[in-house]
Image (cartoon, helix red, strand yellow):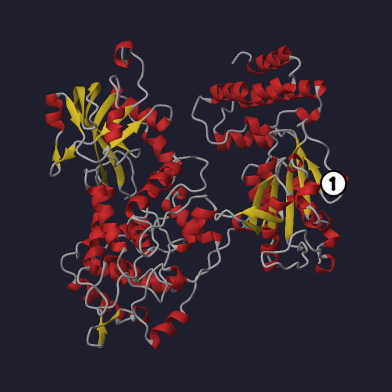
């Protein structure tokens, strides 16, 4: 018996394309014949074999639209998915090609926005609000909650109802420039002539001179769209960038306003600003290959026609093989469609690796990743962008954050981001004189700590900072859920007076962590050998020593879960505020990788913040010698006015219920304190939502927290009196 017979909701719902064989819509034939067919002989075969009788299926068509929408899209293209027919799978022929379907053709094509897919076969499972909404819309005829999508992190920047939430307004200008450039694909004479006319008014386009087979030089006679976009995306002042962008916009007939600033937009190296080689080295089809990928990229992001993904991959791989393209191609695609394509310039690659922990595949001759891997990376990131807690929620935000991190500059000549097609002395001099725009500092202060959701008083936060500055080492201890980890990182920002994760190292202590892991020791290499390697703390010492004017912070989670005296080793002595000097330097147990035993000291500008859960009975007391080197501050559960106001305003907790939640937790804490001690109380983090609650969901959310988070903790507390734990939980949710 299948699911259709027993009436259960299917675990798999399939949204499939129906356009192939020369872009012919097969929907009428599929509905007439009671089937759906995979239009590929070598793709999606396993997915099709996964379809089961009883699974629901919908024929969809995905595209983008800017006009005639039922909401204000602020001029941005919107992803649209039309539902053309729905049905239930009745039989799978297990050939990867065809399934039998009981179709119900849609009487009127219905359009769904935002949460769409360009894949020919898209499996959607229930359980997520976006997926649940799509399934109700498609199979039950329910309306889409459009405003909920507009407020969601991935779409808020473009379509959110509050205009002051919108950044990256420059994206519309870049997209329109790209669209207008595409009109010159077949005949580029007017384009290159116009760019040279702009160049006659500014020295910043003097690099557009070619070298020919006979050894002569002259104005560039052809250009690719990426190099054209690069004319105002090079290292120069914003005023010069705006001037060139404005002239190019007039040449192309662009109506969007020239951006007021270019924050976070990657630029070309002034000495490597072409995407192709000199005429003397250039292949006949090189520039055309760049136009091909430019055009294929737009078609790919605007439609789910079956072969467009393959076309993009083929043109992308062909372009990356050209001399001088490499990683720059991704940057050019990002300029053309900032919301759809990821830039893999050097700063973004470092951000992806260091901050997001994403490995970037490399595969082409010049090191850049191949087209399939590039699109897979984009798909994976887009899925992450929809997560409320992810550090970034769009490609423009990722690029800006990478820019703000200010990673050390790399040697672009060796890295291969691009190649320059000019090398005259004048142009080299101009490149040396180009203004390098430094990434701005994002200030952070006690005011920002409080604004972000700290429920301590200002005086308490200032006291914590004062203790950290003077003692250099601080332990935040307290019952579970009192925000120790959260406050530790915000204190680090406030100490540095800027939000800069590049100067914070985080590590968690545990019973298996050793001195060799944390400071220095022998570790296996990829070749199966052992090599001396520096640990997190010694790396932080080196970073701080190299930048004495900047504060660096090491945050140690659960510092009492390891053996701090053993893990720090001889550096425990040097932690003292009075011993942060070269005069107190000590030799380490292991020499460095070169065999040297140079004395090491902990610099004044390196601070340590540890967190410690004092309710954990499995941990031994911290070594007294270790305690002497730290200031200890105990954090308490904070359920006062500041907490109540914040969870109502920022997290959507029902204002009529917030007092009751606080009362119930306070009563539970009084009972815990009387029975077990203050250190076992429940902290406010348990009842502080991590994201904004939906309307009228406060009761449900609180019950879920009580049953799945607080309840198990109470069972652990009263492991020898389970009835006491059950009674405490029942009181917590009584009447709700």
Give residue 130's quadrant in the image: top left
Apparent side of residue 736 relative to residue 381 in the rendered image (left or right): right
- Residue drawn at (53%, 68%), measured in percent from left and top? 409
Residue located beneath label 1 in the image: 627
* Front residue (pair 594, 261): 594
Apparent side of residue 129 relative to residue 325 in the rendered image (left or right): right
Task: Work out which quarter of the rendered image holds the C terminus and state it.
Answer: top right
Height in image: 623 above or below 276?
A: above
- Residue drawn at (40%, 56%), measured in percent from left and top? 169
- Residue drawn at (33%, 81%), measured in percent from left and top? 206
Height in image: 191 above or below 154?
A: below
Residue 537 x, y percent position in the rendering: 70, 55
Residue 417 x, y percent position in the rendering: 41, 67
* Front residue (pair 139, 330): 330
How many numbered marks does the figure carry? 1
Residue 19 x, y percent position in the rendering: 18, 39
Helix, strand or loop under label 1: helix
Examine the rendering and report whether any part of residue 445 can be seen. no
Residue 544 x, y percent position in the rendering: 69, 63
Apparent side of residue 654 relative to residue 247 in the rendered image (left or right): right
Height in image: 174 above or below 129?
A: below
Give residue 125's quadrant in the image: top left
Task: Work out which quarter of the rendered image holds the N terminus and state it.
Answer: top left
């Amino acid at each position: 018996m299948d699911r259709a017979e027993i009436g259960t909701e299917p675990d798999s719902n399939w949204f499939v394309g129906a356009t192939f064989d020369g872009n012919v819509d097969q929907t009428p034939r599929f509905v007439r014949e009671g089937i759906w067919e995979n239009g590929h002989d070598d793709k999606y075969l396993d997915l099709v074999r996964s379809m089961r009788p009883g699974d629901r299926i919908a024929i969809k068509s995905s595209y983008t639209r800017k006009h005639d929408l039922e909401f204000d899209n602020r001029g941005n293209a919107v992803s649209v998915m039309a539902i053309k027919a729905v049905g239930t799978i009745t039989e799978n022929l297990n050939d990867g090609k065809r399934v039998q379907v009981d179709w119900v053709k849609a009487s009127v094509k219905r359009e769904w926005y935002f949460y769409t897919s360009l894949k020919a076969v898209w499996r959607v499972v229930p359980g997520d609000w976006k997926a649940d909404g799509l399934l109700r819309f498609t199979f039950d005829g329910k309306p889409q909650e459009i405003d909920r999508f507009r407020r969601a992190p991935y779409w808020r920047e473009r379509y959110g109802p509050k205009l002051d939430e919108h950044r990256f307004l420059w994206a519309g200008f870049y997209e329109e420039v790209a669209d207008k450039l595409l009109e010159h694909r077949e005949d580029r004479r007017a384009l290159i002539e116009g760019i040279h006319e702009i160049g006659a008014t500014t020295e910043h386009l003097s690099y557009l001179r070619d070298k020919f087979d006979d050894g002569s030089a002259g104005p560039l006679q052809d250009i690719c769209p990426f190099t054209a976009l690069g004319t105002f995306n090079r290292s120069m002042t914003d005023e010069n960038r705006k001037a060139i962008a404005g002239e190019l916009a007039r040449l192309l007939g662009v109506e969007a306003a020239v951006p007021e600033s270019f924050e976070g937009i990657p630029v070309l190296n002034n000495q490597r600003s072409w995407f192709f080689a000199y005429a003397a080295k250039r292949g006949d089809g090189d520039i055309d290959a760049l136009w091909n990928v430019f055009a294929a990229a737009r078609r790919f992001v605007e439609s789910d026609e079956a072969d467009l993904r393959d076309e993009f991959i083929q043109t992308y791989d062909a372009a990356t093989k050209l001399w001088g393209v490499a990683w720059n191609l991704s940057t050019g695609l990002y300029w053309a469609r900032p919301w759809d394509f990821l830039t893999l310039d050097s700063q973004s690659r470092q951000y992806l690796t260091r901050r997001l922990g994403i490995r970037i595949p490399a595969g082409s001759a010049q090191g850049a990743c191949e087209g399939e891997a590039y699109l897979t990376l984009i798909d994976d990131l887009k899925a992450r962008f929809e997560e409320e807690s992810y550090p970034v929620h769009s490609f423009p935000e990722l690029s800006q954050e990478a820019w703000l991190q200010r990673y050390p500059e790399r040697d672009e000549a060796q890295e291969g981001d691009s190649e320059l097609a000019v090398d005259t002395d004048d142009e080299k001099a101009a490149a040396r004189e180009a203004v390098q725009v430094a990434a701005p500092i994002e200030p952070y202060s006690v005011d920002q700590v409080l604004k972000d959701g700290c429920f301590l008083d200002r005086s308490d936060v200032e006291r914590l900072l004062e203790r950290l500055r003077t003692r250099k080492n601080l332990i935040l201890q307290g019952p579970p859920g009192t925000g120790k980890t959260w406050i530790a990182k915000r204190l680090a920002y406030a100490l540095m007076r800027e939000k800069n994760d590049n100067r914070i190292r985080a590590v968690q202590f545990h019973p298996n962590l050793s001195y060799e892991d944390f400071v220095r020791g022998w570790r296996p290499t990829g070749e199966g050998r052992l090599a001396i390697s520096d640990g997190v703390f010694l790396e932080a010492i080196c970073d701080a020593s190299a930048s004495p004017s900047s504060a660096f912070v090491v945050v140690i989670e659960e510092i009492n879960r390891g053996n701090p005296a053993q893990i720090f080793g001889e550096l425990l002595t040097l932690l003292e505020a009075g011993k942060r000097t070269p005069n107190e330097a000590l030799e380490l147990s292991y020499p460095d990788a070169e065999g040297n035993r140079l004395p090491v000291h902990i610099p004044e500008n390196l601070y340590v913040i540890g967190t410690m859960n004092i309710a954990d009975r499995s941990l031994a007391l911290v070594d007294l010698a270790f305690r002497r080197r730290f200031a200890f501050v105990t954090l308490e559960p904070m359920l006062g006015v500041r907490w109540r106001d914040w969870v109502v305003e920022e997290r959507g907790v029902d204002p009529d219920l917030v007092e009751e939640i606080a009362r119930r937790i306070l009563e539970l804490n009084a009972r815990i304190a009387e029975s077990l001690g203050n250190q076992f109380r429940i902290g406010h983090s348990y009842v502080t939502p991590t994201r904004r609650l939906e309307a009228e969901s406060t009761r449900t959310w609180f019950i879920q927290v009580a049953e799945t988070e607080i309840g198990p903790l109470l069972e652990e507390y009263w492991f020898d009196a389970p009835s006491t734990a059950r009674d405490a939980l029942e009181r917590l949710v009584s009447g709700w």
